[in-house]
Amino acid sequence: MAKKPTKAQKKVEKVMREYGAGTLKSSAGKKVTSRKQAIAIAMSEAGMARKKPTKKGGKK
């Protein structure tokens, strides 16, 4: 059985569809033409761009 997509995955899918349709705009209001820029926008909007904190320390 297939897993349901998370909210973040749905957001990325939505943004990439906008890019494919040519309607995705950057924060400056210009049309996005770079796939890498579209992915960066999608990850940022989905909240996936931030690094998760790593555990520090360990056994001593």
Image (cartoon, rainbow, N blue to C red):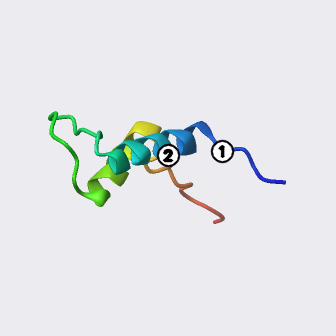
- Residue sitting at 30 percent across and 58 percent down? 35
Q: CA distance from mark 1 to mark 2?
A: 10 Å
Q: Nearer the viewer, residue 18 or 3?
A: 18
In the rendered structure, are the residues bearing label 1 and label 2 in contact, judged by CB atoms less than 8 Å apart? yes
Q: Residues within 10 Å of mark 2 (few under 14, many from 20)?
A: some
| Image position, residue 34 (x, y; %) | 24, 57
**Residue type at mark 1?**
Pro
Which structural element holds mark 2? helix
Q: Residue placed farthest to the front in the image?
A: 21
| Image position, residue 2 (x, y; %) | 78, 53
The answer to whether residue 5 is left or right of residue 55 is right
Q: Quadrant of the C terminus?
A: bottom right
Is any part of residue 35 visible from this angle?
yes
**Residue type at mark 2?**
Glu
Q: Quadrant of the N terminus?
A: bottom right
Sequence-wise, the earlier of marks 1 and 2 is 1
Is any part of residue 49 visible from this angle?
no
| Image position, residue 50 (x, y; %) | 42, 46
Q: Is residue 27 above or below residue 13?
A: above
The residue carrying mark 1 is: 5
Q: Nearer the viewer, residue 33 or 58?
A: 33
The answer to whether residue 11 is left or right of residue 58 is left
Q: Nearer the viewer, residue 44 or 59?
A: 44
Q: Is residue 37 above or below residue 6?
A: below
Identify the disc placed on residue 40: none
- Residue sitting at 55 percent across and 40 percent down? 10
Identify the disc placed on residue 13: 2
